[in-house]
Amino acid sequence: MVRLTGSVINPEKVVEHLKHEVKIKSVQQQILEQLVVIQASEARGIDVSSEEIQAEADQFRYQNRLENASQTYNWLDDQLITAEDWEQGIYARLLSQKLSQHLFDSQVAAHFLQNKVQYEQAILYRLVVPYRPLAQELFYQIEEEEISFFEAAHLYDVDENRRLTCGFEGKLSRWQVDADLSAKIFGAKPRDVVGVLQAQEGYELWMIEDFIAPELTPEIQQQILDSLFSEWLESELNYLIHCGQIEDDPHSVNL
């Protein structure tokens, strides 16, 4: 509980605030998912040891420079939680990770091979300007080599960070962009400029620096694992709702 001058912020007010911010459903979803994880883990004999929790806590303290117990307790106070709350949160995260690995670790490689094309990546630069005529003019100038894509991005992009990096957007996989844009980007050649396309911020041009062949890196392995686990969680929740163990608009849950 937090006490401010003239008012008290108690759990009821927190719930009220979540409702006002239209966040109560997403929080409820997270709670239900955790209950499913607990049930499924118990059924499979999966648990998290105190040593694993301690190791995770130590790693967090190291990364956040909480070098002693006093600093750690000050951080906990600042977060309005107890050491027990923190440990329970670590337990819940580790339990989800262990269940995910138990269920889907052996399926990741096969999923990658079946969907390999979706993990092809492109190193991309992006330029966004507010008006179509300006975007069209820059497209022509770049094509005629009157200005480089990098110089155009540095001078005209609506986003300051992209101006500073001359339009560098990073590495994107096919699955990370919508189908139309994906077809244009991955149907082009290195150094091609794609555009003019309408975007939320205005009108955009893309330049393809290079393509990266699909490879099952640890990062992609984790992405696939997370995706498979998320799909499984959604399926489990839908099944429990269908069976009546969870109501569509629950105030209570019977798992």
Image: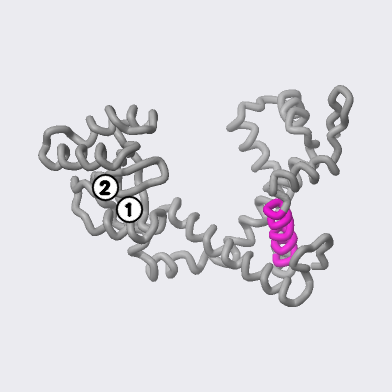
Relative placement, left or right, of 28 versus 145 is right
Residue depicted at x 71% and y 24%: 71
Residue marked by disc 2: 196
Q: Estimate the spatial distance between the alpha carbons at disc 2 and disc 1, rounded to whole Å.
A: 21 Å
Residue marked by disc 1: 121
Crowding at mark 2 (Cα within 10 Å: few <14, some 14-19, many 20+)? many
Amino acid at the residue labelled 2 = Val
Q: Which quarter of the figure is the N terminus placed in?
A: top right
Residue 101 to residue 241: above or below: above
Amino acid at the residue labelled 1 = Gln
Crowding at mark 1 (Cα within 10 Å: few <14, some 14-19, many 20+)? many
Which mark is on residue 182?
none
Relative placement, left or right, of 236 versus 9 is left
Residue 246 to residue 83: above or below: below
Query: Which range is magenta?
Result: 25-40
Name the spot of residue 213 as percent of width and height, x first.
28, 56
Q: Which quarter of the figure is the C terminus placed in?
A: bottom right
